[in-house]
Amino acid sequence: GAVVSQHPSWVICKSGTSVKIECRSLDFQATTMFWYRQFPKQSLMLMATSNEGSKATYEQGVEKDKFLINHASLTLSTLTVTSAHPEDSSFYICSALGGLAGELFFGEGSRLTVL
Amino acid sequence: LAKTTQPISMDSYEGQEVNITCSHNNIATNDYITWYQQFPSQGPRFIIQGYKTKVTNEVASLFIPADRKSSTLSLPRVSLSDTAVYYCLVGVPMDSSYKLIFGSGTRLLVRP
């Protein structure tokens, strides 16, 4: 089946630095990708919809200048957490829309820890 | 976007059949129902998707009544490895504005 890969799977950074997370669709082209954030024991929260070649659409309450999303090609979307702080520590998951039935494929997730 | 309601948690034993019901009273005509499974520190994994009546694949069955205001995921003969969180979502696949909003999910614990 279709595969979505995220990198890195985990990252630790100092407060104030920026971190980039990549999301790739490995065997299909994804015009639309989604970014989610998940805190421990909670559900996934949709952050933004990433569209290839255009600006991302952010959900209410998500700071677009804080979470920069770039979808420069049909197989790659990136999420950059700028000036990260400890409260940004979370599990970030991307997904891509693909397949004949419009199935949503999820990446393995990236765990960010900000010290 | 249709909101979904599921039980927060369920307990079962190995070998039993588990049925998880999801309510989606405001489901739209074009919405499909999709179930995902998530293990700790992993992304959700697609289980099954349906529109009406019954759908079955190699891992589960999905029962959808005529009014489509609810759906039931059925896992036959669960094993310890089925311990996970199960999410029910509704939406229109392949729609350019398609996005899935996750509810609280059901935390299934399978005991030996």
Image: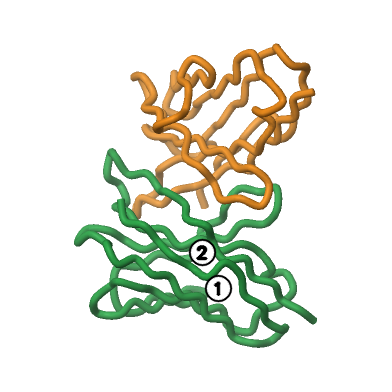
Chain colours: A orange, B green
Q: Nearer the viewer, residue A13 or A8?
A: A13
On screen, residue B97 versus residue B41, left or right, reads left
Q: Which residue is mark 1?
A: B59
Q: Nearer the viewer, residue A17 or B76?
A: A17
Q: x%, y% of residue A8?
A: 70, 29
| Label 1 neighbour load within 10 Å: few <14, some 14-19, many 20+ | few
Element under disc 2: strand
Q: Residues within 10 Å of mark 2 (few under 14, many from 20)?
A: some
Image-quadrant location for residue B71: bottom left
Report the residue at 51% width, 42% height from top. Answer: A45
**Residue at the spot 27% in from the left edge and 58% down from the top edge:** B31
The amino acid type of the residue labelled 1 equals Val
Residue on which the image places disc 2: B47
Q: Position of residue B73 (x, y in %)?
A: 48, 74
* Circles 2 and 1 in contact, beta carbons < 8 Å: yes
Residue farthest along the bottom direction in this orientation: B16
Disc 2: which chain?
A: B
Query: For numbered disc 1, what is the local secondary structure?
Result: loop
Q: Residue at x 58, y 42 (%)?
A: A107
Q: Please tell me whether residue B70 is drawn above or below residue A83 in the rendered image.
A: below
Q: Quadrant of residue B28?
A: bottom left
Mark 2 or 1 closer to N-term?
2
Picture coordinates of residue B83, whole percent (x, y): 69, 68
